[in-house]
Amino acid sequence: MGGTADEPRPYYEVAHELAGKVGSSECDRGILVCGARVGMAIIANKHPQVFAAVCEDPSAAAKARSINNANIVTLGGMNTAPYKAKEIVDAFLTTEFKSGWDAEIQAFLDQSMVDIRRIEAQEFKP
């Protein structure tokens, strides 16, 4: 289930709703929490312009942002301690795309976003 304790909803509905907002640029980034963290990432990544990353530690969250331009992080409520979730979210929210990389790698990362958009347009036509 997803949603809140007061309003439980299926995890896939919550992931779909948030991913739609992030993919349409209504929101810059999103945080999803479900039992194992994987289901929401699968659903979110079906949306164009959404890069949802399953993160188990702050290092993974920082790399997902700086290398992959992840705009959604998914956390597992059944297996992520609250203190660790805070560390992961902090890393996700404070790391920018391309941060910490030299100019050559930054240029590659910029081109990767162009190439990914091209692949999306070719392969996932509405």
Image (tube, grey):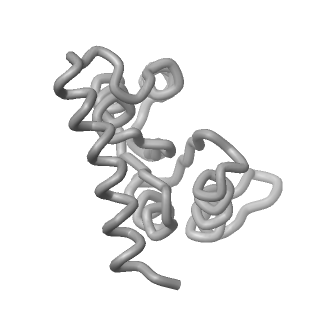
Which residue appears at 44% of the width and 24% of the height?
96
Q: Residue furthest bottom?
A: 126
Residue 15 vs 98, above or below: the answer is below
Residue 12 vs 5, above or below: the answer is below
Q: Nearer the viewer, residue 49 or 33?
A: 49
Q: Residue furthest left?
A: 104
Which residue appears at 40% of the width and 54% of the height?
36
Q: Nearer the viewer, residue 71 or 39?
A: 71
Q: Nearer the viewer, residue 78 or 53?
A: 53
Residue 95 is drawn in which quadrant?
top left
Residue 117 lies left or right of residue 63; in this view the side is right
Q: Nearer the viewer, residue 8 or 63?
A: 63
Give x and y (percent) for residue 115.
Answer: 29, 56
Residue 61 lies left or right of residue 35; in this view the side is left
Residue 56 vs 27, above or below: the answer is above
Residue 33 lies left or right of residue 39; in this view the side is right
Residue 15 is drawn in which quadrant?
bottom right
Q: Residue furthest right?
A: 6
Which residue appears at 40% of the width and 29% of the height?
97
Which residue appears at 17% of the width and 25% of the height?
104
Give x and y (percent) for residue 122.
Answer: 35, 77
Quarter occupied by the N terminus? bottom right
Give x and y (percent) for residue 76.
Answer: 44, 46
Q: How many circles with numbers are drawn on the protein?
A: 0
Give x and y (percent) for residue 94.
Answer: 50, 18
